[in-house]
Image: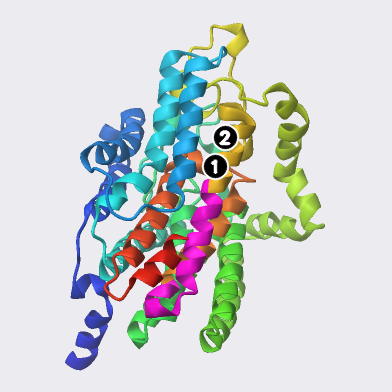
Amino acid sequence: MTFKTTQSLFNSIPIAAQLNWTWAHTFILLQFSLQILLLFPEIGVFRVPMRIASFALGLFLLARLRPKGSQHPATNPAIVVLGIMLLELCLHPHINSMTAGVAQCAMYLAILSPLFWVRNLKITQIGFQSLMFLMWSFHTLSASVGVLQVYFPGKFQLSLSTTIQNSTYGGDNLLITLANGQQVYRPMGLTDIPGGAAIAGFYAFLFGVAIALKYKNPILRIVGIGSAAIGLFCIYLTQVRSVLVLAAVSMVFLAVVLVRTGQIARLTAMVSGVTALFVATFWWAIAIGGNSTLQRFSSLFVSSPEKVYYQNRGIFLQNTIETLLPQYPLGAGLGRWGIINSYFGDNTDLVSQPLWAEIQWTGWLLDGGVPLIFAYVAALYLACQTAWKIAINRQLGDFALWGGLIFAYDIGAMAITFNYPLFMSQGGMEFWLLNAVLFAAASNSKIVDNKLLKTVRL
């Protein structure tokens, strides 16, 4: 590699040009650090406080950084969400316990907190891109470790979650049988949960595609494509079908953005490249993972999408609409489901016994009923609308492609709410962080005039 080529590569990477470090970067770095610390057996026993610390960090920044600057359009419905939660805490007669109720409210506040504290940050386009590179680097590393865990069973095996070790099956139900007959845990990556590499794989794929499309440097493009391939391979081997669907949905809507903005060359490159990646990594995963991987993903196509969804998750949505909605139109009482109930619940009261929520819509209904559902959906809609406006705004130049990426990610995240309670996890907090930082970077752009800023805010 010549000096000129090397210099060109580093000039293409925003983090090398100007880091523009902010609290958002520190937040992401600490989130990753807390995740990695759980891999050490001596620290893994403190799993609960470590998980709480991940969300407490958002509350800390909310208290430390006073909101100022441009307000993200989703902020007002987010305030309504928090107001509904406060009313549920104060007025609902069937709260599991005051501790669990307060914890549930704090969880919602922590997850939504980036909408408030990111406003304080002077994030430039360069700062936003360096944040994307930071996230991409960590997730690509995690996905790469997941690949090594499959190719070299036992050598790269990290500490297993103590919660899983103490469960009924001790983690045996999370093993997969490879094509050579050997049993291994589903790729964990840099997590302590078998299958945890799926999320890292999704981000490695998503950011890898964006980097390959956005930057002209051939080495950076190759690295981006390689990252995307490793990410998809991890998703296949973890056998987490919902994440594969999330990746596919995100690509469809990224293509919509490229069509809308007339970027035909990029659209052609993306469609052909992504299609090739999906096919190539699928056969790669089958060659390594064997029949269990083939059967797992083939089940997505055994019948119509409606039937496949109903058999796997649709039944929970139906139960939410037909059974739970008439029972709890204004919520069932805080602290009655999920990790909040597990960590803080007091289930001695027969009236406020634990309830089960497999999908986000059930969780919203149980926590705040129909008003909470409408308020949260309004916030999500405005997040998608804002990312879309940034994505199609030609005055933002090449930065608009990041808007397209976040818009595609937003649509995929909304789709996941029908499969998993995303907005009661770190994934929900990352969703609001990415959207808040994107908006802040667009609003703080030196090339944004008053007319453009007004358009972005609408």
Q: What residue does disc 1 label?
A: 376
Residue furthest out toward the front: 451
State the image coordinates of residue 116 (x, y, percent, origin top left).
Answer: 34, 45
Depth order, front residue of 416/386 = 386
Depth order, front residue of 87/21 = 87
Residue at 71% in and 29% down: 325
Q: Give the range drawn in magenta.
A: 379-401
Q: Distance between the residues labelled 2 and 1?
A: 6 Å
Q: Is mark 2 on a helix, strand or loop?
A: helix
Q: What residue does disc 2 label?
A: 372
Q: Is residue 6 left or right of residue 413?
A: left
Q: Which amino acid does label 2 sit on?
A: Leu
Residue at 56% in and 47% down: 378
Within-10-Å neighbours for mark 1: few <14, some 14–19, many 20+: many
Residue at 25% in and 55% down: 25
Q: Check contact, mark 2 vs mark 1: CB within 8 A.
A: yes
Would residue 383 be counted in the magenta stretch?
A: yes
Depth order, front residue of 26/36 = 26
Image quadrant in which you'd find residue 181: bottom right
Residue 205 visible? no
Q: Is residue 355 left or right of residue 110?
A: right
Q: What element carries label 1?
A: helix
State the image coordinates of residue 109 (x, y, percent, origin top left).
Answer: 40, 35
